[in-house]
Image: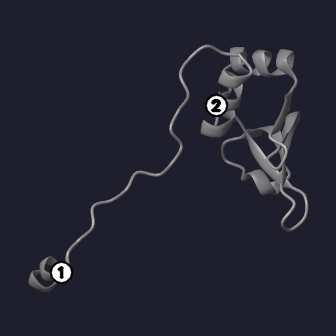
């Protein structure tokens, strides 16, 4: 399955990201992406995407990661609500309950 995800490039403390098409089995850092679809600069908040290529790959069956999905909704490439990408909080366990268990 193909995924559209972010690949970090850039130096330490100067983050820049590529939006790449990669097979789900490969990590983003492996360099085995199939196509560069855009870029993201978090310091400036700039997102550039190749709209026609992104639409093509989505129509073929590629899925976007959570962050890229939110970029696509912002750029109005796809319709929908944004997704919450933050991890869910787990319940805290009190010390008394730990001692009993």
Number of labels in the image equals 2
Residue at image coords 79%, 47%: 42
User: Dot 1, crowdedness within 10 Å: few (<14), some or many (≥20)?
Assistant: few
Establish if 20 lies above or below 79: below
- SS at badge 1: helix
Residue at image coords 33%, 59%: 90
Please report whichever mark, 2 or 1, sits nearer to the chain's N-terminal start.
Answer: 2
- Residue at numbered disc 1: 98
Comparing 58 with 79, the one in front is: 79
Residue that protrudes farthest toward the front in the picture = 44
Left or right relative to 84: residue 34: right
Residue at image coords 76%, 40%: 22
State the image coordinates of residue 101 (x, y, percent, origin top left): 12, 80
State the image coordinates of residue 19 (x, y, percent, origin top left): 81, 38
Left or right relative to 36: residue 83: left
State the image coordinates of residue 39 (x, y, percent, origin top left): 86, 38
Establish if 69 lies above or below 18: above
- SS at badge 2: helix
Quadrant of residue 74 within the rendered picture: top right
Comparing 36 with 79, the one in front is: 79
**Residue 70 numbered mark, or none:** 2
User: What is the distance, in whole Å, between disc 2 and disc 1 at their CAs?
Assistant: 40 Å
Establish if 41 lies above or below 98: above
**Is label 2 in contact with label 1 (beta carbons under 8 Å)?**
no
Residue at image coords 13%, 81%: 96
**Residue 50 numbered mark, or none:** none
């Amino acid at each position: 399955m193909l995924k559209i995800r972010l690949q970090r490039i850039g130096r330490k403390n100067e983050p820049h990201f590529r939006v790449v098409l990669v097979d789900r089995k490969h990590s983003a850092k492996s360099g085995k992406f199939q196509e560069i679809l855009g870029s993201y600069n978090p310091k400036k908040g700039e997102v550039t995407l190749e709209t026609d290529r992104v639409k093509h790959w989505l129509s073929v069956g590629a899925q976007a990661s959570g962050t890229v999905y939110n970029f696509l909704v912002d750029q109005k490439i796809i319709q929908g609500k944004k997704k919450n990408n933050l991890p869910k909080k787990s319940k805290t366990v009190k010390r008394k309950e730990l001692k009993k268990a």
